Image (spheres, grey):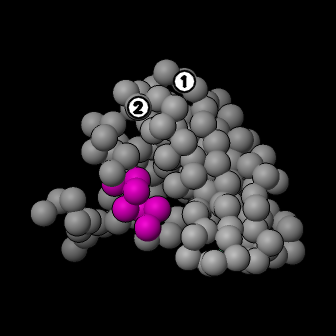
Amino acid sequence: IIKSVISVCNYEDLSEADRLLADNAFEMTQHSYSPYSHFSVGAAVRMSNNHIVRGCNQENAAFGVTICAERTALFAAGAEFPDTPIEAIAIAARGTDGQLLEEPVSPCGSCRQAMIETELRSNQQLHIILCGKEKFYVMEGIRQLMPLSFAEF
Ligand code: THU
C-alpha cells in the first residue's frame, strides 16, 4: 500500500507566506497566454531567499511547444537564482469560462517530473499548494503526487 498525505484546507488555514504565494498564483492566471485552450494556469514559487518567482502557461500554434505554468515558474527561478533552493510552489487555474476553478488544479505528469528534479537540485522537499477558488490541497514533497518516480531508481 502506497499512501499520499494531502491536507485539505481553507484559505484561512494557510500560513501567511502560503497565502501570499497562493495570491501570486491566482494573479498569474491573468497573465496566461492561452489563446488555444483558453485554460489559464498560474504558478508561483518561493525560494529560500524569500524571492517569489512567477509563471503562467505559454501556448503556441504548434501545440507541442506550449509550456505549462509550473515549468515556466520553476525554470525561471532556476535561471534567475541557480544556487538558491526552491522551497514551495502554488498553482491555480481559470477554466474556459474565465472563472477560478472550484477544485484545486493538479499538475500534469511532465511538471511533476520537473518538480522531482527541483527537489533533487534544491536538496529539499517542495511544499506544494494546489489552489481552488476556496479549497486548497497542501502537501510536503512531490512524491505525494508522484510515487515510484524515475529518479528513485
Ligand atoms: N497546463 C499547465 O499550465 N499546467 C498543467 O499542469 C497542466 C496544463 C496548461 C497547458 C495548456 O496551456 C493548458 O493548460 C491546457 O492544457
Region in magenta? 110-116
Question: Can residue 101 be seen in this snapshot?
Answer: no
The front one of 62 and 99 is: 62
**Type of the residue with mark 2:** Pro
Q: Which mark is residue 82?
A: 2
SS state under label 1? loop
- Residue at point 42%, 62% (across, down): 112
- Residue at point 84%, 66% (across, down): 99
Q: CA distance from mark 2 to mark 1?
A: 14 Å
Q: Which mark is residue 105?
A: none
Q: Is residue 90 above or below residue 96?
A: above
Q: Quadrant of residue 1?
A: bottom left
Q: Is residue 84 magenta?
A: no
Whether label 2 lies within 8 Å of ligand 1 gets the answer no
Horizontal and vertical percent position of residue 55: 64, 48
- Residue at point 45%, 57% (across, down): 6
SS state under label 2? loop
Horizontal and vertical percent position of residue 98: 86, 68
In this view, which residue lies farthest toward the top? 49
- Residue at point 43%, 70% (across, down): 109
For residue 3, side relative to residue 79 (left or right): left
Residue identified by numbered label 1 = 50
For residue 6, side relative to residue 123 (left or right): right
Q: Is residue 115 magenta?
A: yes
Horizontal and vertical percent position of residue 123: 28, 37
What main secondary structure does the magenta stretch of the protein show?
helix
For residue 141, side relative to residue 53 (left or right): left
The front one of 1 and 47 is: 47
- Crowding near the residue tagged with mark 1, few <14, some 14–19, many ≥20 C-alpha atoms within 10 Å: few
Q: Is residue 42 above or below residue 44?
A: below
